[in-house]
Image (cartoon, rainbow, N blue to C red):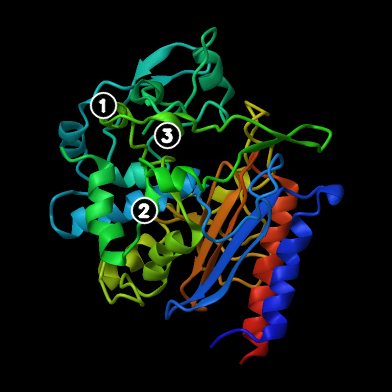
Amino acid sequence: MPFSDATVQSLKKILGDAVNLENGGVPGISAVVFDKAGNELLLHSAGTLGASSREPLTPEHVFWMASCTKIVTALSVMQLVERGSLSLDDGEQLEALCPELKDVQVLRDDGTLEPKRNTITMRMLLTHTSGFGYSFFSEKLRNYHYPAGIEEFSGRIEDVKMPLIFQPGVSLDEYIQTHICKPLGLGSVKFVLTPEMKAKVVHMHYRDPSGKLHPRDHLYRQALVVETEQEQAKLFNSGGAGLFAKPQEYCRILAALLNDGTCPTTGVQLVSASTVADMFTNQIPQFPQFGQQGIAAAKPELTNSLPVLYPTAADDDDAQQGWGLSLMLNGGITGRSAATGWWAGIANVFWWVDRERGVGGIVCAQVLPFGDAKVMETWFALETAVYAALQEAK
């Protein structure tokens, strides 16, 4: 059921308020809200392409999805699991496919390395329990790479070969285009951008400690400057952070998750209903407060410190937060169900899929550091208004 005109206008106002630069806003923001049938309950952009641009931001513009790439990679993995080509729990198979994982070591607190005691499995990779980390979240990983430093967003595979921070064929682009994007009719979800996509990329920004916004070079710059086929072939297809997309197209992938693995608009089944159920099942019940651990800011220019990954209801201190297969699971203060899956990208892009209540959405900005207060405030406000509207429609 579509939202009323009044509800749509109220949601648009939330986005409009977010681009009030005099009130700590961002230059531009886009959002999509959809239901289980694939209906777009909201499709709206507010503001401009960037702080230095007067071009209005529209739904046709392209965002760097950053870690929102992970769920698309996970879908690809689960397709291969269904076909019997991959195992979630066979570490030897994974090491045969990715020999780099065989000899990776664990970084001790004192900066020395020790052999890993356990074989890394695909399930570990999909649940963030393999031991890999990011230098902007881990001081010891950051310090290990000094004096040269490490840049995970360089677009070079050499810069993601690093030690673990605790004990644990076909290019990815070609696979995703063939098995996910083409069946869903998606032309603007890519690792290697077309010239048309490059012309529509939203500008990147940095908010300094005083709260002032500045234009900045794109964090994932390499993907925007490769031109020749040889250069494109060398670009690392980062399954953790490499996709660019129009939010509207990206949400067709999320809508398939909301609809038990089948795209509600094309009828194409990406994965089975049981596979989606597995993806939305908590894989780490032994860590019930996973999301309460918070995020440190080892590189403050890239991320703010966050006390929790996602706040639960104020009167529910014992609320469990888990991890499915490449998505976090928890309810919260907005009205979402406890079975809601969600994740985010470092440039302040946030998606959610609530299979119990039949709704999902995405809020997209392009500003650093991660955890921008204005973008998160807008995300929470939009989600809250969406659930209030759904409740009123009952």
Q: Label 2 belongs to which residue?
A: 72
- Lower sequence index among marks 3 and 1: 3
**Quarter of the image with the C terminus in it:** bottom right
**Mark 3, other Cα within 10 Å: few <14 / some 14–19 / many ≥20:** many
Eye-nearest disc, 3 or 1: 1
Q: Secondary structure at mark 2?
A: helix
Q: Is residue 295 visible?
A: yes
382 to 366, vertically: above or below? below
Which residue reaches farthest top? Answer: 147
- CA–CA distance in space, label 2 to label 1: 25 Å
At horizontal 28% and vertical 51% (from top left) the residue drawn is 176
Query: At which x and y percent is residue 194?
Result: 37, 44
Q: Label 3 belongs to which residue?
A: 223
- Lower sequence index among marks 3 and 2: 2
- Tell me which amino acid carries mark 3: Ala
Query: At which x and y percent is residue 326?
Result: 41, 51
At horizontal 64% and vertical 75% (from top left) the residue drawn is 386
Residue 390 position by quadrant: bottom right
Residue 117 position by quadrant: top left
- CA–CA distance in space, label 3 to label 2: 18 Å
- Lower sequence index among marks 2 and 1: 2
At horizontal 37% and vertical 24% (from top left) the residue drawn is 156
Q: Label 1 belongs to which residue?
A: 230
Q: Which mark is residue 171?
A: none
Q: Is residue 243 visible?
A: no
198 to 180, vertically: above or below? above
